[in-house]
Amino acid sequence: MLKPYVNRLILLLACLFVFQPECHAYDDILEVNVGDTFTVNGGSYRNIQGVLWDYDTSVFETVSVNSYSTRGKFKAISPSPSAGSVIQATIYYYKDGTTSSGVNKAVASWKVYVADDGSESTVSLPVSMSMELGGVQTVTATPSSSKYSGEYTWKSSNHFTVEVISSDGNTAKLRANAVGSTYIHVTLDNGNTDAVYVTVKKGSASTVTASPASGSYEKGTKITLTASVSGATIRYTTDGTTPTQSSKAYTAPLTLDKSFTLKARAYHPDREDGPVVTMNYSVKESSQISFNIISSANKTVEVAASPNKYQGDIVIPEKAIIGGVTYSVVRIGENAFENCANLTSIKVPNTVIEIRNGAFNGCSGLKSLRLEDGEKPLYLGYNSHDTSSIGKGLFADCPLKSLYLGRNLNYQAAYAYGESPFYHKTTLTELTISSSVTKIAKQAFYYCDGLKTVKIPSSVTEIGEMAFGTCKGLTSVTIPNSVTIIGDWAFRYCNSLKSIIIPESVKRIGEGAFAICAFASIAIPRYVTEIGKSVFWGCSNLANISVDKGNNHYLSINGVLFNKDVSTILVYPAAKTEKEYRIPESVTEIDKVTFYGCRALTSVEIPNSVTRIGERAFSSCANLSTVKLPNTLRYLGSHIFGGAGLESIFSEITDPSTIEYEDNTLLYYDEYDKVTLYVPRGSVFKYTSTSPWSKFKNIRPIENAGVDDISADEDADKPFEVYNLNGAKVGTSLDGLAPGIYVKRQGGRSEKVIVR
């Protein structure tokens, strides 16, 4: 095809090889086929600054093109219009002996015709294929030439049986609409054609399964039938006959009220009829569980102890038949399952509203408990076989691993001792809380170390006091956007809990709710109106607290939590890295444990606006060496500086007897002889006669502006420390200090120093 044009092509390309500036060549005879790779060459220019290629990307794609080479390799990917497509190279260069400032350019162009390979492609389809009714399947046509790029046309001989629902070149999607057979044709635009014979049959049969399977069960057990294919209708009989399409349709679980044979079969319009499944059910006699009649008039009974001891998996029925009379089972009696060591699991129906004391004493094999869903709360007693542990949890002797909680719980008064029915259940690892639960009861899972993850359903509005306290293995808790109250100490000591999201629905966060948790940051949502004291006490990893800008009660300033008007500082995160902190002058109260455990702090400036400091406000601040107390203070909590590592306290309080004290303790008992207390001149006697100040072993006077001179010549050769007038240590030398008045302490001698 190209032979007549070879000489003309050579002549035109020669224009490029002579390296003439602005050389422009059109090769209007170059022809290639789709899929061919060809090379164009603009010559061997010297001093090339760059080559810019331009071409139609719908016709060509580059194989190898270098921005500093006039040689380009291209591949034809589609036929070009009849006028041909152009590949053009603009070559930027400068002549020998010139510089790059005198850049010249040459333009080379090639007009290329791209065509199909010209072969007469044929096409082939599979001889036959089968489909299931309602199914979708793909069929592919194979052309004889790999370079064929023409049009494919698909058609069904009978689209009522098999329909072509979409096609893309040599593939088509088919949908089986009816049982039968038909041809699917594919035709090329060159007239060649082929066909596939498609047979449509019904799909494989849907089968039926039952839960529970055949067996003996308590009266009232629900039997659920399930078809393996969605859309199938289950037909069943209970009289032993074979079900047909006219038999009763299954629409809801069947209730086992007598022994019967159940036969079921699934029918589906697009599938073969399913096999007949046969299941035999019998009713367990109530005599297998012992009962005591509570009320003949109300027809209620309780589960009683059995002389044969209960064992294995026990399902307590909702109803019991005694002497031909049907009673409701409403209670599990005292010691009903006591010492049933071979009892492994138990299901408690929602008719039971009380489990009495000692019901599960000594059930050393009980690992699974299911409290079925119900609206009425379940009232739980406690273990009483051991009189030395009144209040011992109802399941204290049971190695429970799995619990399904489908009810709200109420406890007997003995739980004031601090032990819920599941107290210290370290074996409990699987907890499911159903949507019937609206409140997690007080101390419900206190000390359940085995729990790793807890998902609270959206039905719950309140998490009770200490509900998950001391769950040391807990790493993940999902609190839904329905909870409004997180109770006091709810997650206390969950020291593996590294993150938690408080939902926007929460209004109250109780005292110590997240004390001693492991997260590094926490966000207070918009509608929280109350945050209890000590809420993040002992959270040694906490570095930042944020508050939603729309919150009307609380505020965060640089990660520190305040009330909205900044009159009370609530929490200074223990893991903040700043060494010095100045409390805002609007603050009048430092809350309980505000700075507890802030290990980086060396200095805290307390303004004269502060009147109250709460319990343990600066406890365990190990690097806080010196602090000044303003004369405005009117209340001091217990152990404010306990474990803080203080060396000195500068108190400006002139009369300590006017202060209200929580319990007359400022430090831990063994720290008073390690801290030097500086007090106003003339107030030393008042301090030595007022508790807790009288506990200090070393009380010294200071002047109004600093520390009084105490002459001691023998101290002249000892090292000294320098403090500012707020009592904060600023160094061990006067060198480099800003101008001002400082206090220099050397051994037993203290004096004011002016630095200019």
Image (spheres, grey):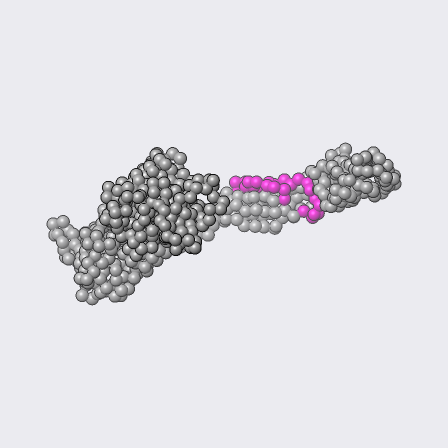
| Residue 289 drawn above or below residue 755 | below
Residue at 24% x, 54% y: name it.
418
| Residue 564 drawn above or below residue 458 | above
Residue 166 colored magenta? yes
Q: Position of residue 269 (x, y in %)?
A: 43, 45
Q: Position of residue 311 (x, y in %)?
A: 25, 64
Give 606 or 88, whichever is nearer the viewer: 606
Residue 516 colored magenta? no
Q: Position of residue 724 (x, y in %)?
A: 41, 43
Say how many tags the image has: 0
- Quadrant in which the N terminus is drawn: top right
Residue at 14% x, 54% y: name it.
294
Give 750 or 6, whichever is nearer the viewer: 750
The magenta region covers 143-170
Residue at 68% x, 40% y: name it.
150
Left or right of 603 on screen, residue 334 = left
Give 325 or 341, whichever is nearer the viewer: 341
Look at the image and tell me whether residue 239 can be seen.
no
Q: Position of residue 122 (x, y in %)?
A: 69, 46
Residue at 35% x, 49% y: name it.
710
From this viewpoint, which residue is outermost toward the left? 297
Look at the image and tell me whether residue 293 can be seen.
yes
Left or right of 285 on screen, residue 85 = right
Left or right of 326 on screen, residue 713 = right
